[in-house]
Image (cartoon, helix red, strand yellow):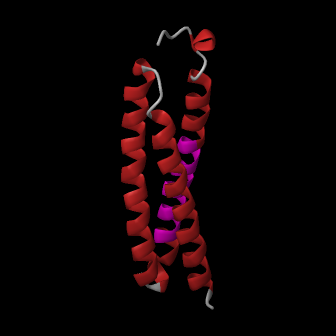
Amino acid sequence: MSEKDTYLATAKARLDEQIAKLDLLKEKAKDEFDEQKENIQELIADLEEKVTAGKTYIGELSDAAEEKWDHVKESFEASSDYISGTIDKLFKRVKKTRDPEKTGIKK
């Protein structure tokens, strides 16, 4: 297996994991307080766009010529890092807002 094939397999696995986490986040966000729910749903919609872009990058990685490989790989990495970081932040935010006493938000 070439370096490119190995990277593609890793990238696909990483994106699949992010999609699974995003699905779980969507489920958890259903129970959020009204003030937080709308904002979280907007961020989730943004993440879904980034996931779609990640799928596009994977397709481009498959077809990329050697001279474009590094550029497409960097684009995928940046998108993937953004998705992972944002999902982690949203999970913390969802967890924090579960307790109205801590946030001052009334249900």
Query: In the rendered structure, does residue 41 fall within the stretch colored magenta?
Result: no
From the viewer's perspective, is 80 left or right of 64? right
Magenta-drawn stretch, dominant element (helix, strand or loop)? helix
Q: Nearer the viewer, residue 77 or 51?
A: 51
From the viewer's perspective, is 56 left or right of 19? left
Quadrant in which residue 8 is drawn: bottom right
In percent of width and height, residue 77 lies at 54, 61
Q: Which residues are magenta?
A: 72-87
Instruction: Classify 56 as above or below 31.
Output: below
Residue at point 40%, 20% (across, down): 34
Q: Nearer the viewer, residue 80 or 73?
A: 80
In percent of width and height, residue 15 lies at 52, 63
Q: Nearer the viewer, residue 72 or 27?
A: 27
In percent of width and height, residue 107 lies at 46, 13
Query: In the rendered structure, does residue 74 fall within the stretch colored magenta?
Result: yes
Quadrant in which residue 55 is drawn: bottom left
> Total label count?
0
Instruction: Classify 44 as above or below 49.
Output: above
Residue at point 52%, 73% (across, down): 70
In percent of width and height, residue 89 lies at 58, 36
Residue at point 61%, 24% (across, down): 96
Instruction: Classify 106 as above or below 49.
Output: above
Quadrant in which residue 6 is drawn: bottom right
Residue at point 57%, 69% (across, down): 13
Q: Residue at the far bottom: name it.
A: 1
Q: Nearer the viewer, residue 50 or 28?
A: 28
The quarter in which the N terminus is drawn is: bottom right
